[in-house]
Amino acid sequence: MKVTIQKLCQWKQEKKPIVCLTAWDYAIASLLDDAQIDLILVGDSLAMVALGHNNTLPITLEEMIHHTKAVCRGVKRSFVVCDLPFLTYQTSVTHAIESAGKIIKETNADAVKLEGGYPAMVETVTRLTEIGIPVMGHVGLTPQSVRVLGYKQQGKSAIAQETIFNQAVALEKAGAFAIVLEHMTEELAQKITHSLSIPTIGIGAGKSCDGQVLVTADLLGLSPKVPPFAKIYTDLKTIISDSVSQYAKEVRSHQFP
Ligand code: KIV
Ligand code: NA
């Protein structure tokens, strides 16, 4: 049965952890869906792990739509969320509606995600929700702000904690159905999780969140660079590299076919 927003909120109530991962193509998405991953995020991290960019800034709306269509073809059960890329929603509410609307119209994604909980973004979340586009929030370390924040842990000072906490509360009030809490202190993530009625999905934010997300390429050992909070479950890089080297060797030595 398809995962819905209602179920995600119910699982928070029942304290049943929500399992999320990222996907960027049909093959990965099909595997995640078969493995009962509850929420699949077509994260703009695909700019790095699938397209070779240095950060998430260069990816376009068209590229995100292209990858989201492929992901959706592989998904039957999971709830699919597509990231809004940098500069496709920050300039105005109208621009955000056009960009998010294009994703929802042209793909089978169930929702969009955007970064930030400052007042202008809260207004954007209100408007998107009003017109029927479900929005997932994202606070703490927001990678589209890498030029300002770097990739450092957020929420270290009391004032930073208060700012992030207030952003999360404002996003819930604006209608966000869930919020990603990225690379912040466990204490802050716990406080936010206990104060909100919508689910929090943590990445580098400790055990208390209602769900967890990782970049799938990190978990599989496929990423060039892995953040300190990720857990590497397997070494696909070595497996793939050994396999293709073996193939090359066999072709060159006339062993295969
Ligand atoms: O782009 C992404 O993969 C993300 C997750 C890490 C939350 O935004
Ligand atoms: Na992202």
Image (cartoon, rainbow, N blue to C red):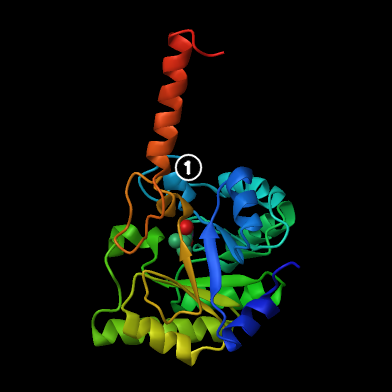
Residue 193: x and y in percent read: 46, 85
Residue most extreme to the left: 157
Residue at the (65%, 56%) spot, across then down: 34
Instruction: From the top left corner, tell me how far across and down residue 203 is, in percent.
Output: 41, 68
Image quadrant holding the N terminus, namely bottom right
Q: Residues within 10 Å of mark 1 (few under 14, many from 20)?
A: some
Q: Quadrant of residue 183?
A: bottom left
Mark 1 lies within 8 Å of ligand 1 (Cβ measured): no
Position of residue 211 measured from the top left corner of the image (x, y, whole percent)? 51, 74
Q: Secondary structure at mark 1?
A: loop
Is residue 58 visible from the viewing direction of this image? no
Amino acid carrying mark 1 in the image: Ala
Q: In the current view of this chain or complex, which residue is farthest to the top?
A: 254
Q: Nearer the viewer, residue 254 or 59?
A: 254
At 71% from the left edge and 48% from the top edge, which residue is drawn? 73
Quadrant for the C terminus, please: top right
- State whether residue 157 is above or below residue 149: below
Q: Is residue 189 above or below residue 145?
A: below
- In the rendered view, tell whether residue 172 sits above or below residue 222: below
Q: Is residue 137 left or right of residue 79?
A: left
**Image location of residue 47, percent across then percent down:** 46, 46
Question: Could you say which is closer to the camera, residue 142 or residue 17?
Answer: 17
Identify the residue shown where x is 25% and y is 79%. Answer: 156
Front in this rendered view, residue 121 or 33: 33
Q: Residue furthest front?
A: 255
For the point 43% across and 9% down, which residue is it?
253
